Amino acid sequence: MSDRTTTPTLSAEQVVRRLEAFRARRGYLMAHQGVMAAALPELQDAYAIIYKALTLEQRHLEPLEKEFVWLVLLITAGEHIGTHHVALFYERGGTEAQAEAAFRLAAFGAGTAAFEMLDAHWQRHFPALPAHAAYVQAGGALLAGTPVASAWARVALLAAHTARRDRWGVAQELIAAYGEGVPEGKLAEAMSLAMWPCGVNAFLEASEVWLELIRAGRVAAGEAFRAWAAMPGQEGLALPARGPGNPASR
């Protein structure tokens, strides 16, 4: 017997009720909600829960701080459709001067490879120009004259680097954030937001970088994060090698 479950077929009236409920709850409707309502109702239910947890509930980031991070993240990901976050940014007190800083940070994040090259290949040619310090100073110069504090830039750039799966950038932001005393909860939340537009694996890769930094003693992690780093076997499922000499391959 098969253990496969079958998703019940919904009537047209049930689909319309689901979509009307979403529109009433959120104030708008998007096409993927229709696909889920018509064929994947359990996914639509789970979607609502994870969306609420990721974007709507108050956790570590302050309301305007969170929408600033969202602005940088969506610009980085090219998600022009996320205009509801533009509305939330303004509703929570955001200004065009802060928005300009968000565009600057997103553009800066896209150019991080220049500093990574310095670190990986040319540091010996420029010994008085440490790559990490140069990176942090460049970001600070970018914010000069803007109403955005360094701590906001740290969490926003961390989200942007997570979205771009830029492991070097993630490491630099985590090191800088710890140096500035940014709470770990804010860092974790900023990284997690990238799951929505860019997928779980972007969050996973950034988390791997964080794990490596803690284990290498490059950041002064708190007790909870040290406990996480001390757990062995965090490399995922290990598959046996497949080949003629391995019985598992037969």
Image (tube, helix red, strand yellow):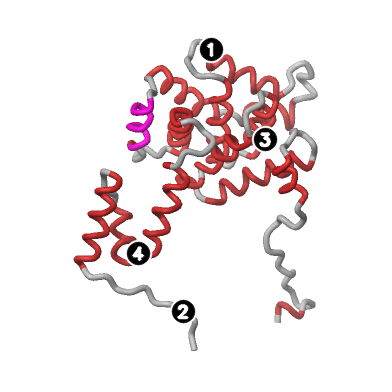
Residue at left offset 78%, top offset 43%: 215
Look at the magenta stretch and give its main secondary structure.
helix
> Mark 3 packing: few (<14 Cα in 10 Å), some, or many (20+)?
many
Q: Neighbour class for label 4 at 10 Å: few (<14), some, many (≥20)?
A: many
Of residues 96 and 127, which is closer to you in this image? 96
| SS at circle 1 | loop
Residue type at mark 2: give it. Arg
Q: Do the residues labelled 1 and 2 touch (CB within 8 Å)?
A: no
Which labelled disc corresponds to residue 4? Answer: 2
**Residue pointed to by mark 1:** 144
Camera-side residue: 110 or 35?
35
Compute the Cα span from label 4 to label 2. 17 Å
Q: Nearer the viewer, mark 1 or mark 2?
A: 2
Q: Nearer the viewer, mark 3 or mark 4?
A: 4
Residue 154 place in picture, x, y as percent = 58, 27
| Quadrant in which the C terminus is drawn | bottom right
| Image disc number at residue 41 | 4
**Horizontal relation, residue 89 to residue 147: left or right:** left
Q: Is residue 202 above or below residue 122?
A: below
Q: Which of marks 3 and 2 is nearer the N terminus?
A: 2
Counting residues from the start of the chain, the first of labels 3 and 4 encountered is 4
The residue stretch that appears in magenta: 84-92
Image coords of residue 125 (percent x, y): 78, 21
Secondary structure category for the residue under label 3? helix
Kindly identify the amino acid type of the residue bearing the numbered disc 4.
Pro
